[in-house]
Image: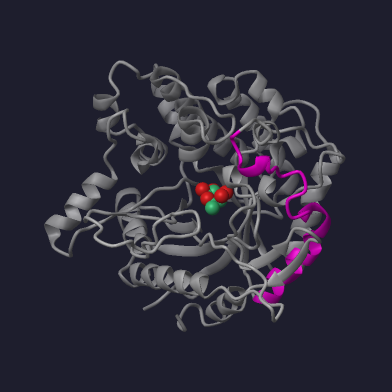
Amino acid sequence: MSFRDDFKWGVATSSYQIEGGNLEDGRGKNIWDEFSKMPNKVYHQHDGLIACDHVNRFKEDVKIMKDLGIQVYRFSISWPRLIPNGTGKINPKGIKFYHDLIDELLDNGIEPFVTLFHWDLPLSLHRQGGWLNPNIVDAFSEYAALVAKEYTPKVKHFFTLNEPQCFCGMGYVGGQHAPGWKLNHHDSLFLFHNALKAHGAATRALRDNAKCPIEIGYAPTSKPIIPKNNTKEAIEEARKQYFSIPSLEEPYYFYPALFSDPVILGDYPEDYYRNFKGYIPEISKEDLKLINQPLDFYGQNIYEGIKKIILEHNEPHTDLNWEVIPESLYWGPKFLYERYNLPIYVTENGLANADRISLDGKVHDPQRIDFLNRYLLELQRAATDGVDIRGYFQWSLMDNYEWAEGYRSRFGIVYVDYSNQKRILKDSANWYSTIIKSNGDSL
Ligand code: FCB
């Protein structure tokens, strides 16, 4: 057994990281437009105003995907491109852009998987408190309803939130991401709860307004804990740790149970109530019901894992210093499937690398091929062991704006020369294409 016959091979991107198109087409400002210009926040104060100029070049980008044999494309809609102020008035040019993109994808046999929120919060909502303001729940569901009305039945698969760990945790607690706040524990937990309610309300709004049956999931991230060895005890220890939530003094928001237990199991885990006592917001039964909407699948972005051994040597690292731990694509999906019992999509996975154009005019990225090969072999092992894995989205189709890291590092299988917006296929793009053709058998 390997990957299922209908396994979906894809790539992922997000709106602010690739779209550009400046603001002339009526897109409202988002929190990254402002955050990127604050001193010492983003590498060289890079911003996404031009990025990959995807709004003007999407046809070329879709053609690249088609030529590579990409079957599914996960992209996000920019909330302020559709609704510039977050609620109310709609931007017709924004609505049209996504129709054009979706039509182009469908004409080329590529299935769209749409993420509603990949971090580009409308700035005017931020001025009203953003995710800290409980009204965000209604605003987000208004936006979700619009997306469903406009883009179904063409789009049948949706993700609500991308990585609440990052946009809530790093955005509002750690302060490394927009809007750069460092909230106290009370406010942080209140904000997380709002984000989860927004997920639930948007899930409902998508279903209520869709013109056809649709499938919905969300796309959190985590760093799976790798068991020390293959004994039953070591595996249980790793599982326990992965689903625990440490004290508030650590970056507790990266642990999956905090954001996934309420969404999928209907309540926060015991650790939450025990470790965060004194800081927990009011949580009503209705809240928990709203958060716990039935989902069709569970997405997970996985780049790294945590190995419980003392590292004696310098283990492999990426260009952004993330540890290369291929087993995370075995243990992550396995543990998550066993706990949450939903079909799984790996919604992001890929390598940051210092790619450049060689003298021969090509971009050679053997590190990325090796990275993807190792990780995908582990995912294949999980599938063979019976984990219900439906698809894999490589991050990313093309080099793009890597948030606080600006354009300093490259994640694409397609190189973008930002001086002239030329796209060059990296070796990894051709490699990935052959893997897709064999449905992973040639790994
Ligand atoms: C994830 C984000 C994505 C991208 C990758 C490298 O945390 O979801 O936008 O930046 O990391």
Q: How many marks?
A: 0
Give the residue displayed 34% in from the left and 67% down from the top: 382
Locate residue 198 relative to residue 422 in the image: left or right: left
Query: Could you say where residue 298 lies in the image, as x and y percent from the top left?
Result: 45, 51
Give the residue displayed 32% in from the left and 28% down from the top: 248
Give the residue displayed 45% in from the left and 19% down from the top: 187
| The quarter of the displayed image where residue 154 is located | bottom right
Query: Could you say where residue 68 lies in the image, as x and y percent from the top left?
Result: 66, 75
Query: Could you say where residue 47 lies in the image, as x and y percent from the top left?
Result: 70, 42
In front of the other: 193 or 226:
226
Q: Quadrant of the C terminus?
A: bottom left
Query: Is residue 90 one of those drawn in magenta?
Result: no
Residue 112 in sight here: yes
In front of the other: 114 or 278:
278
Give the vertical position of 135 relative to 432 (above or below). Answer: above
Give the vertical position of 215 relative to 277 (above or below). Answer: below
Secondary structure of the magenta portion, mostly?
helix
Query: Could you say where residue 245 lies in the image, as x and y percent from the top left?
Result: 29, 36
Query: Is residue 64 one of those drawn in magenta?
Result: yes
Locate residue 84 relative to residue 127 in the image: left or right: right
Magenta residues, start to end:
40-68
Give the residue displayed 42% in from the left and 57% down from the top: 343
Residue 108 in sight here: no
| The quarter of the displayed image where residue 281 is located | top left
| The quarter of the displayed image where residue 410 is located | bottom right
Residue positioned most to the front: 359
Q: Quadrant of the N terminus?
A: bottom left
